[in-house]
Image (spheres, coloured by chain):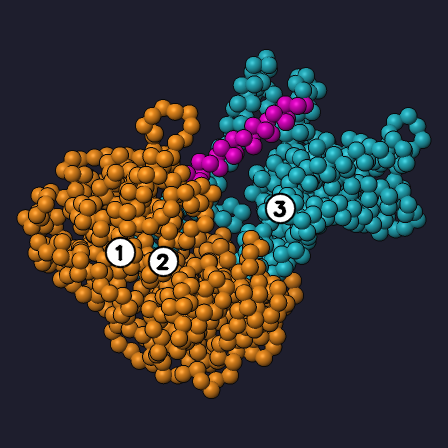
């Protein structure tokens, strides 16, 4: 065990494992590429070059990072509180819808104000939509997993309906009208697509990071970790679950609004290529904390942008990026199992659970002998 | 319970009068070989057992012998290594050194299955039964039927169960559904389950922890019937009283090592206590000090509650439990300032619900709860705490603490929102740390650091954290629910001292405990709860243990005045 500081914690076996797992994922990915008749090294070089090789490439990667990051944070907030929100995709679409409604209605304001209104509308729509599963959970005890998963379809089909009917712009394709230019997020670097959403994403990460240091964050987290302890200590369970889901859904909605105001400037059916689903993986791999999610979101953006470059040069389908993502996830989860096994105390506890003695002895016996 | 029950010792020691006394300090296995009448060699012998978990040694070079027809007490504090040793024997842990001999033959026990085939069975502290199945079904599970048939035939099994039941005085109905049985009856099922497998050696892990005094007596007489029939019994416990009462020989473990093996008839509770904790125990009651015979001496009742103002009044409360079954039926009681009211009762008679209605965690259907003159019925747990309730919950692992949190985080669990522990928005890390240091010092919490997750601390230290948090807030009333459960004598003594201190400072204490010894030791008044009702309230000075025991079992007629 070294004492190098990483993310404020000691670097240990536990922290190295994810990177080893990532390496193995690329190794297996390489074998797949080789089988497809492509030189893996060349392919990986193209991924790096295509995503980080030029200002433009970096800008594109960052644009993807913005969406992945905010969506990843959305899921991470819920997961940290043990609320399994798998509905970020649907909440994202509802957020985009909220942003659109404001973006096509508000005119003649100072650009900053109208952008902020669009984003707030996105947050509000996402949050409202996520309150459906939250209310069902606290009132009726319905599992939020199932409801959030199913509401994804509800949201996507609803948007699809709107785009084919009520909010369809004149023309052939199912597009909404464009939002007014003052509602668009400004471009940060000339001649690239990098927009001010990067700042929004950074603010979101800072918000989540400090959320856990705040009073309200402590309550949300405590309720998530142990409902009976939180209730006993006087915390409000219902309120906490609703707030957690609202924050999570709000961030997912913000992702949609940022996509709308920063990239598409109108609502289309495929405004998100599944960011809300990838966000689940990002939240898990990022270990549910803001810095971890930032790193993983950037890594996944590199993969996505690089895969597009690989498709253009080598003809490898973009789906390969998904394969790699899946491999990384699988290997990291396997790695997780190994870190567990290498934690002797946990192992011992599970041993004791087995013989039904957990209420009596926790912690190493030597410590106990000394202490009591 | 010692002053209550007749001794079974007379029976069991007579059978073993051939034993000669031995020095407690020389626990050599060979010592007993010469004096054994029935067998020259022990049925079981564990030599040099060492078992460790990574760098922590749980058992070190342990020698343990068990002879035919003896009840061998295995005594030690929590963490002394009793359960580890028996888990090694039962095939749950693999020792890193040492050998196990069963009837002189060296054996390798890899799993409980191996142990059972060698004639060793274990009754765990928490029973491993299927509640929806019948007694017979639970007993024959895992035993291969003799004939190859598709359908399960239980008539033969039932016959055998009834035979065993008669032989050892284990009253049971083979057709009863286990979920409907009392804890004592379930334990009988577990014991018959072991006997059904034709075993020679029975391990009982803390068998009396859930039993009423009456059930306990029945268990002890069953055990002596079993050893008469040639079985050998290992009896794990940390209660000195039981060892004296039930065993013929005792092995005491401390810190993973054997510190002595003694004949029960040649020793005293005081000596065993000394062996077990390695020091002389003093139990301060707040009024006097002195060496005690653990579990016997009572806290003096100098400050009678008479004349003190009422701090808690429960008036005709009805409430349901989690399964929507009536748990409290017209329950009424009062606790005065400066007294400890102990609630005696068998598990599941409404104690948890009672603690929950007072703390606001459970709604009452009707009735009223008043704390210090204010009707708190219907108030939230937070409001009640702020009004002056300190609550040491039944389950410190799942309710009292969040195991993933540090000490500091656990200490602010009930006051995270208030100054100085937090500001307008953020928690105050410095103040949290300072407070944690204060509590760790004042309550003598032993921890390697303030930042580790509390899951790595021992039960006693966890309870000190809960105590530190609860007692450091402004309070008029304390609910202490099984506050010493699973703690060793030293830690339990510490908890009791704190309760005495609180009582003496004028706080009312409502003590709910399944451990009758604790109730008798600590309370000023004793109320007995049964099936959600208070069956009677006694002044500790005039309390009759037999009567309390009967009331705990619901025998109103015999116990009524």
What stretch of residues is rendered in magenta?
A: A318-343
**Where the C terminus of chain B falls, by quadrant?**
bottom left
The residue singled out by tag 2 in the image is B211
Question: Horizontal and vertical percent for residue A87?
Answer: 69, 40
- Look at 84% across and 51% down and name the residue there: A113
Question: Horizontal and vertical percent for residue B225?
Answer: 22, 51
Q: Is residue B207 visible?
A: yes
- Look at 37% across and 57% down and name the residue there: B210
Position of B494 with respect to B109 (left or right) is right
Question: Horizontal and vertical percent for residue B468?
Answer: 45, 68
Q: Which SS class for mark 1?
A: helix
The residue singled out by tag 3 in the image is A83
Using the image as rendered, state which of residue A38 and residue B141 is in the foreground. B141
* Cα gap from disc 1 to disc 3, whole angstroms: 50 Å
Identify the image quadrant of residue B215. Answer: bottom left
- Identify the chain drawn in orange: B
Chain A in the picture: what colour?
cyan
Position of B19 with respect to B294 (left or right) is left
Q: Does the magenta stretch include residue A329?
A: yes
């Amino acid at each position: 065990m070294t004492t190098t500081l990483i993310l404020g914690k000691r670097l240990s076996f536990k922290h190295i494992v994810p990177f080893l797992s990532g390496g193995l994922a690329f190794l297996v990915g390489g074998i797949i590429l080789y089988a497809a008749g492509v030189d893996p090294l060349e392919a990986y070089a193209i991924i790096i070059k295509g995503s980080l090789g030029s200002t433009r490439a970096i800008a594109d990667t960052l644009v993807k990072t913005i969406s992945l990051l905010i969506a990843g944070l959305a899921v991470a907030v819920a997961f940290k509180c043990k609320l399994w929100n798998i509905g970020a995709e649907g909440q994202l679409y509802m957020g985009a819808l909220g942003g659109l409604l404001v973006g096509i209605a508000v005119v003649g304001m100072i650009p900053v104000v109208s952008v902020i209104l669009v984003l707030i509308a996105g947050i509000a729509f996402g949050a409202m939509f996520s309150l459906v599963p939250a209310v069902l959970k606290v009132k009726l005890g319905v599992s939020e997993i199932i409801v959030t998963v199913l509401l994804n379809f509800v949201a996507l089909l609803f948007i699809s309906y709107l785009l084919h009917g009520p909010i369809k712009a004149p023309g052939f394709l199912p597009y909404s009208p464009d939002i007014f230019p003052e509602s668009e997020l400004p471009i940060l670097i000339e001649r690239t697509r990098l927009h001010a959403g990067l700042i929004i994403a950074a603010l979101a990460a800072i918000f989540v990071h400090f959320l856990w240091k705040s009073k309200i964050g402590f309550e949300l987290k405590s309720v998530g970790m142990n409902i009976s302890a939180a209730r006993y200590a006087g915390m409000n369970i219902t309120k906490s679950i609703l707030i957690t889901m609202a924050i999570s859904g709000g961030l997912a909605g913000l992702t949609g609004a940022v996509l709308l105001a920063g990239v598409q400037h109108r609502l289309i059916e495929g405004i998100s290529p599944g960011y809300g689903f990838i966000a689940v993986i990002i939240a898990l791999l990022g270990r549910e904390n803001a810095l971890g999610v930032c790193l993983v979101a950037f890594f996944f953006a590199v993969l996505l942008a690089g895969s597009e470059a690989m498709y253009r040069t080598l003809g490898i389908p973009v789906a390969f990026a998904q394969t790699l993502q899946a491999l990384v996830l699988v290997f990291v989860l396997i790695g997780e199992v190994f870190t567990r096994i290498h934690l002797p105390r946990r192992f011992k506890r599970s041993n004791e659970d087995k013989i039904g003695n957990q209420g009596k002895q926790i912690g190493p016996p030597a410590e106990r002998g000394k202490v009591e | 319970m010692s002053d209550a029950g007749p001794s079974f010792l007379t029976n069991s020691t007579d059978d073993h009068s051939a034993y000669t006394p031995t020095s407690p300090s020389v626990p050599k296995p060979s010592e007993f070989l010469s004096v054994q009448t029935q067998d020259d060699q022990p049925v079981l012998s564990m030599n040099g057992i060492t078992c460790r978990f990574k760098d922590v040694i749980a058992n070190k070079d342990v020698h343990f012998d068990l002879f035919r027809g003896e009840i061998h007490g295995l005594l030690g504090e929590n963490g002394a290594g009793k359960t580890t040793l028996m888990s090694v024997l039962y095939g749950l842990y693999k020792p890193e050194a040492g050998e196990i001999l069963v009837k002189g033959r060296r054996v390798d026990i890899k799993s409980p299955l191996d142990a059972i085939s060698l004639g060793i069975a274990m009754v765990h502290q928490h029973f491993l039964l299927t509640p929806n199945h019948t007694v017979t079904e639970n007993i024959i599970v895992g035993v291969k039927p003799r004939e190859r048939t598709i359908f399960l035939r239980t008539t033969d099994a039932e016959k055998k169960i009834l035979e065993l039941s008669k032989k050892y005085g284990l009253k049971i109905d083979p057709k009863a559904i286990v979920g409907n049985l009392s804890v004592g009856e379930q334990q009988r099922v577990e014991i018959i389950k072991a006997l059904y497998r034709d075993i020679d050696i029975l391990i009982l892990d803390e068998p009396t922890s859930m039993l009423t005094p009456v059930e306990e007596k029945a268990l002890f007489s069953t055990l002596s019937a079993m050893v008469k029939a040639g079985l050998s019994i290992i009896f794990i416990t940390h209660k000195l009283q039981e060892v004296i009462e039930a065993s013929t020989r005792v092995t005491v473990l401390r810190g993973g090592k054997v510190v002595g093996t003694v004949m029960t008839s040649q020793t005293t509770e005081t000596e065993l206590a000394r062996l077990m904790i390695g020091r002389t125990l003093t139990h301060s009651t707040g009024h006097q000090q002195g060496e005690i015979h653990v579990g016997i001496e009572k806290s003096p009742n100098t400050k009678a509650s008479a004349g003190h103002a009422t701090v808690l009044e429960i008036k005709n409360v009805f409430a349901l439990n989690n399964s929507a079954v009536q748990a409290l039926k017209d329950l009424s009681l009062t606790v005065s300032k400066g007294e400890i009211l102990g609630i005696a009762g068998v598990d599941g008679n409404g104690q948890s619900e009672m603690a929950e209605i007072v703390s606001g965690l459970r709604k009452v259907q009707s009735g009223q709860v008043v704390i210090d003159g204010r009707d708190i019925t219907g108030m939230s747990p937070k409001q009640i705490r702020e009004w002056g309730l300190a609550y040491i919950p039944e389950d410190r692992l799942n309710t009292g603490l969040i195991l993933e949190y540090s000490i500091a985080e656990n200490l602010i669990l009930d006051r995270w929102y208030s100054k100085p522990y937090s500001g307008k928005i953020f928690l105050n890390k410095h103040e949290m740390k300072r407070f944690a240091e204060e509590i760790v010092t004042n309550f003598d919490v032993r921890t390697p650091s303030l930042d580790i997750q509390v899951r790595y601390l021992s039960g006693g230290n966890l309870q000190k954290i809960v105590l530190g948090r609860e007692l450091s807030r402004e309070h008029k009333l304390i609910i202490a629910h099984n506050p010493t459960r699973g703690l060793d004598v030293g830690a339990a003594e510490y908890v009791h001292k704190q309760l005495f201190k609180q009582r003496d400072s004028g706080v009312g204490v409502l003590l709910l405990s399944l451990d009758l010894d604790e109730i008798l030791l600590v309370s000023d008044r004793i109320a007995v709860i049964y099936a959600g009702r208070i069956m009677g309230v006694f002044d500790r000075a005039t309390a009759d243990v037999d009567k309390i025991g009967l009331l705990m079992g619901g025998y109103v007629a015999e116990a009524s005045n």
